[in-house]
Amino acid sequence: MVMAGYEVLSGDDSLTDDDYGVFDTLYATNHIYYGYMDYFLAIPADTQGRGLKDAFVRLHLSPLEKGGLAIDLHQFSLEEDFAGEDALGTEIDLTFFAQVNKVTSVLVGVSKFLADEGMELLGRIAEGEDPTFAFAMVNVLF
């Protein structure tokens, strides 16, 4: 399965005036939608009120009867620029899922964030840093 999309969460170009135009995700679980590295969990706080744009492509393959592989690519930017910059970076997520038996499943993944200057200006990533994240999860239903 291949899926592509473009999401926009509105931002505010000036947080000092009386016009507040930021979309707030409140109590969302955004890592499902905006990458496994969780850089954009608390909108507007994670973008300093500037909103978020996410152009994404997802490729999900199921070569095994009870397992599959997913590759997600996100291109993030601010909806309203910050100090003349709006590019935040690209996140690549690679995940493997397997249903071991009726009650047990496994999810293993690795993610890479290729940061642009916007992430540095927001203070989210240090200059020149391109973080990598890996995880493994076992779910058991009782």
Image: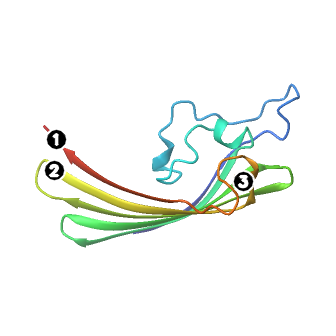
Residues at discs 2 and 1 in contact (Cβ within 8 Å): yes
Compared to residue 4, the image places residue 121 above or below, namely above
Q: Residue at x 16, y 50 (%)?
A: 104
The tag on residue 120 is 3
Q: Which of the two discs, 1 and 3, labels the residue nearer the N terminus?
A: 3
Q: Of the residues shown, which amino acid type is indicated by label 1?
A: Leu
What crowding class fits label 2: few (fewer than 14 Cα within 10 Å), some (14-19), or many (20 or more)? few
Q: Is residue 102 visible?
A: yes
Residue 113 in which image quadrant = bottom right
From the top left corner, tell me how far across and down residue 59 is, in percent. 43, 69
Q: Nearer the viewer, mark 1 or mark 3?
A: 3
Nearest the camera: 57 or 92?
92
The tag on residue 141 is 1
Q: Residue at x 81, y 56 (%)?
A: 85
Question: Quick one: SS at disc 2?
Answer: strand
Residue identifier under label 2: 104
Q: Which of the two discs, 2 and 3, labels the residue nearer the N terminus?
A: 2
Count the numbered circles shown: 3
9 left or right of 5 in image = right
Q: Of the residues shown, which amino acid type is indicated by label 3?
A: Glu
Q: Residue at x 50, y 50 (%)?
A: 33
Q: Which of the two discs, 2 and 1, labels the residue nearer the N terminus?
A: 2
From the top left corner, tell me how far across and down residue 132 is, in percent. 50, 61
Residue extending farthest bottom? 63
Q: Of the residues shown, which amino acid type is indicated by label 2?
A: Thr
Q: Is residue 44 visible?
A: no
81 left or right of 92 in image = right
3D distance between C-alphas at marks 1 and 3 = 41 Å
Compared to residue 64, the image places residue 106 above or below, namely above
